């Protein structure tokens, strides 16, 4: 077969990178190659428009097989992953009944999120009653102060049911969550509790008890390299603490579980998980474990909440589908798909069913579980993997050089960095540099969402700092979803009882007036305004008369730059202040128009959010 392929290649002359580049530059017709086609990522490196075999010839990432150290191609020789669904537990019997229901619908992993009052004598027996522990992964999340008690109860239950060898799951001890979310340190000795936890579960081989919950960082707006860099530092904090407490590195490595987020950056996320396994294996290796198996990273992946939206919420399904697909291709151990309606209500049976079925589609119809590391060898993905690994490693070293993850949390450094990233991403969404379909791009013009919102504060933004018991301000994560600013704006319009009318005065050059009326319609629809589009007018006065007949609050002149010099002053004068006047575009004559009193222009460089906030302030009085 290889010989046949070589013969086929011989039929075609080789084409060098220089020849490809020359052809591309010819097709660009004088446009700058770097500015036009090279993409600068948020992770700090450039992505080229094409990659070839020569780009990966010196990389070591292709030297190993799946299941081999450093596990870049996966920790297993298959691509089976667990389909996980989260259950909030207020009553153990009710949660058990729900677990049995969803286990019959494709779920293979349960995520029990315990409320504090649930933990009492016999709660584990009630919660796990009748569940086949050899076929189901069980994960328990509870408050950090309850983790040890929950671990003891679970181990006793597993011993009583002879399930210590077959059980697989986790208890998420996450004492750093309070610092991240609330700026308050864990009141107990973290190292002592962690060591006691590991000793408590020693008889249960596949029970992981130390959480690295970098999904929190992802949902707070962190860039991909930040999530990975901090996750590695978080994991290394556990390794350092446990080995200092006398725990063998093999045992320490096997008790850590990574919970990571998945953003919609499809190929970058594939590369992130591959890079994560490689870097984590090298970190654990430095502790000299007796077996390389201790270097295997166990990863649970959860689709993003940061990019979920309330308006056009079904688009969340498209986002989470590509996200879960990238995680599956990357070879994670388990996946939770966040229900599409989580941001405005408690997910119901319908949304939970869709979330389950999204993973079933990947397994039963796309057969992604039958191929290990399908992205391996891709010139693009292999290059991305190394690039992301390099940037994440720089951040990891920076954290270690400054005292480690825990110290950086107590100093607020991690939180500050992610809050700055979140602010930057919100600014990018405001300017449409980062797109959210249905929110800041191509909104559903006539959708109303206020009545479907059941969760209070879904569009709010916290202050970002808290106070510890001594009154000292400690910065905490303040990230809100990327869409929250636009949603608050649109809900303000919706709840005001007044829906401003935006009239498109289309005139002149056919192509330009159509393009600009479409741009302007999408622009103002982001605030929930009523859009009145038109085919075109023969005269400016005809358009102004039609706008006044429709009782327009805003008149947008849509034409070509060349025609604005004469059309805009004429339209502005004819309107005579009866409505807000806007020019669609940023014409060369803008300064001259400003002198005429025309001050409102919308174009691709506009801050959409700030512009619409200003209109709301004027029109919703």
Image: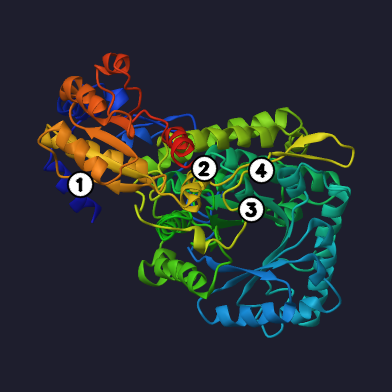
Q: Position of residue 574 (x, y in %)?
A: 23, 28
Q: Nearer the viewer, mark 3 or mark 4?
A: 4
Q: Earlier in the sequence, mark 2 or mark 3?
A: 3
Give the residue drawn at x 31%, y 31%: 581
Task: Indicate left or right for 419 with 77 as reference.
Answer: right
The residue carrying mark 1 is 6
Residue 24 on image: x %, y %: 19, 29
Mark nearer the N terminus (1 vs 2)? 1
Which badge, 4 or 2, comes first in the chain's sequence?
Answer: 4
What label does residue 258 carry, if any?
3
Label 3 SS: strand
Q: Which residue is mark 4?
A: 462
Label 1 packing within 10 angstroms: few (<14), some (14-19), many (20+): few
Secondary structure at badge 2 equals helix
Judging by the rendered image, the residue that carries numbered circle 2 is 485
Label 2 vs label 3, nearer the camera:
2
Q: Secondary structure at mark 4?
A: loop
* Mark 1 or 3, nearer chain start: 1
Is residue 105 shown above or below 355? below
Seen in the picture, residue 98 relative to 568 is either above or below; the reply is below
Q: How is the image coloured?
A: rainbow
Residue under the point 42% across and 42% down: 382
């Amino acid at each position: 077969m290889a010989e046949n392929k070589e013969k086929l290649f011989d039929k075609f002359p080789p084409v060098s990178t220089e020849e490809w580049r020359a052809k591309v530059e010819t097709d660009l017709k004088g446009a700058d190659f770097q500015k036009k086609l090279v993409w600068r990522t948020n992770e700090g490196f450039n992505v080229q428009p094409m990659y070839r075999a020569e780009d990966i010839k010196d990389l070591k990432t292709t030297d190993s097989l799946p299941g081999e150290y450093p596990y870049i191609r996966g920790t297993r020789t298959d691509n089976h992953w667990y389909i996980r669904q989260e259950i909030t537990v207020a009553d153990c019997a009710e949660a058990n009944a729900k677990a049995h229901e969803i286990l019959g619908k494709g779920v293979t992993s349960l995520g029990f999120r315990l409320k504090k009052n649930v933990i009492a004598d016999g709660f584990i027996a009630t919660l796990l009653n009748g569940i086949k522990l050899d076929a189901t992964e069980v994960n328990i999340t509870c408050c950090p102060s309850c983790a040890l008690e929950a671990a003891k109860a679970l181990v006793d239950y597993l011993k009583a049911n002879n399930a210590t060898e077959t059980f697989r799951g986790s208890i998420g001890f996450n004492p750093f969550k309070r610092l991240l979310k609330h700026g308050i340190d864990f009141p107990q000795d973290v190292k002592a509790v962690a060591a006691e936890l590991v000793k408590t579960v020693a008889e249960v081989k596949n029970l992981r008890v130390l959480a690295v919950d970098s999904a929190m960082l992802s949902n707070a707006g962190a860039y991909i390299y930040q999530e990975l860099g901090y996750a590695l530092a978080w994991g290394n904090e556990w390794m350092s603490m446990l080995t200092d407490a006398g725990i063998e590195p093999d045992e320490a490595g096997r008790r850590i579980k990574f919970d990571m987020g998945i953003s919609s950056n499809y190929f970058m996320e594939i590369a992130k998980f591959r890079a994560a396994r490689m870097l984590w294996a090298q970190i654990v290796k430095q502790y000299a474990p007796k077996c390389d198996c201790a270097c295997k990273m166990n990863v649970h992946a959860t689709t993003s909440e940061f990019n979920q939206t309330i308006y056009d919420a079904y688009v969340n399904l498209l986002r989470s589908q590509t996200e879960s697909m990238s995680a599956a291709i990357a070879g994670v151990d388990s996946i939770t798909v966040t229900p599409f309606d989580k941001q405005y209500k408690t997910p119901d049976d319908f949304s939970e069913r869709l979330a389950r079925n999204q993973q079933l589609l990947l397994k039963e119809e796309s057969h992604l579980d039958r191929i290990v590391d399908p992205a391996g060898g891709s010139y693009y993905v292999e290059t991305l993997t190394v690039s992301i690994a390099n940037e994440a490693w720089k951040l990891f070293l920076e954290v270690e050089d400054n005292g480690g993850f825990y110290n950086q949390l107590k100093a607020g450094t991690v939180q500050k960095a992610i809050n700055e990233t979140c602010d930057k991403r919100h600014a990018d969404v405001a300017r449409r540099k980062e797109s959210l379909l249905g929110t800041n791009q191509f909104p559903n013009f006539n959708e109303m969402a206020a009545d479907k919102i059941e969760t209070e504060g879904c569009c709010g933004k916290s202050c970002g700092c808290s106070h510890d018991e001594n009154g000292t301000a400690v910065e905490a994560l303040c990230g809100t979803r990327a869409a929250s600013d636009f949603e608050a704006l649109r809900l303000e319009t919706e709840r005001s009882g007044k829906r401003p009318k935006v009239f498109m005065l289309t005139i002149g050059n056919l192509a330009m007036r159509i393009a600009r009326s479409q741009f302007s319609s999408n622009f103002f629809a982001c605030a929930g305004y009523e859009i009145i589009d038109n085919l075109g007018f023969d005269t400016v006065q005809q358009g102004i008369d039609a706008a006044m007949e429709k009782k327009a609050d805003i008149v947008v002149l849509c034409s070509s730059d060349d025609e604005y010099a004469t059309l805009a002053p004429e339209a502005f004068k004819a309107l005579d202040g009866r409505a807000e006047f806007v020019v669609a575009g940023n014409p060369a004559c803008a300064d001259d128009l400003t002198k005429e009193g025309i001050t409102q222009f919308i174009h691709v460089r506009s801050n959409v959010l700030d512009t619409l906030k200003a209109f709301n302030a004027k029109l919703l009085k």
